[in-house]
Amino acid sequence: MPDLHISGDAEADALISRDPLALLLAMLLDQQIPMEKAFRGPYDLLGRIGKLDAVEIAEHPDLGTVFATPPAIHRFPGSMAGRVQDLCRFLVEHHGGKADNVWNGVKTGDELLARLKALPGFGEQKAKIFLALLGKRLNVQPTGWRDAAGAYGEQGAFRSVADVTSKETLLQVRAYKQQQKAALKSKT
């Protein structure tokens, strides 16, 4: 079992370390909110609905209200609740409701990248970051996984959540992201 330290909360980190669905949902939520809040989101969701199960989440009659109840699980509770349900429906339909079936048994990094990009809410960049997270932190390392993850797969890089192993590395990732934003801003 991996020992992830991303949310800043020991219980939330333990959940994403042991539960593939929690980890996949956290990655989905990692958008327009601090990384720590996104990776705590599944823990908060578990506390509100009692169980993280793709079938139950997919069929939940009012997940938007669950997400919006203060403190909101995400900055955009309605749309993110919808994305979470879309992802869970996809997992039920294509992967037997099991998040780890997305990566179990894949032979190549390109195959895994294609599976991740097929997930609702996962574009190219998010898929590459999650692929790097799987490879670096969970030892899901099909042939060519680093190449498929692109720059996010580089060893010793501090570009994304895949490289967060402590408070110090979180700060390094933040510094990298700030540099990227500044460089992009100077180009425009």
Image (spheres, rainbow, N blue to C red):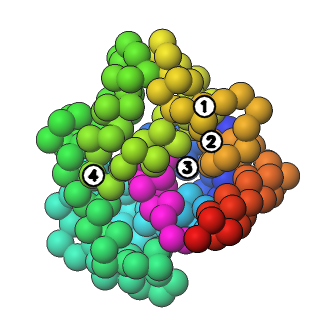
Dots 1, 2 in contact, CB < 8 A: yes
Q: Is residue 150 left or right of residue 115?
A: right
Q: Earlier in the sequence, mark 1 or mark 3?
A: 3
Helix, strand or loop at mark 1:
helix
Residue 172 among those drawn in magenta: no
**Looking at the image, which residue sits at the far right?**
168
How packed mark 2 is, by other alpha carbons closer than 10 Å (few <14, some 14-19, many 20 or more), is: many
Q: Are marks 2 and 4 in contact (CB under 8 Å)?
A: no
Q: What is the CA distance from the residue labelled 1 to the residue labelled 3? A: 24 Å
Q: Amino acid at mark 2?
A: Ala
Q: Secondary structure at mark 3?
A: helix
Q: Nearer the viewer, mark 1 or mark 2?
A: 1
Which residue is tagged 3? 15
Please give the residue where the numbered disc 1 appears in the rendered image. 153
Q: Secondary structure at mark 2?
A: helix
Disc with the residue nearer the chain's start (2 vs 4) = 4
- Which label sits in the foreground, 3 or 4? 4
Task: State which tag comes first along the sequence, 4 or 1.
Answer: 4
Classify mark 4: residues with Cα within 10 Å, few (<14), some (14-19) or many (20+). Answer: some
Tell me, yes or no, whether the two marked residues, 4 and 1, touch with CB atoms within 8 Å: no
The mark closer to the camera, 2 or 3, is 2
Q: Is residue 89 left or right of residue 172?
A: left
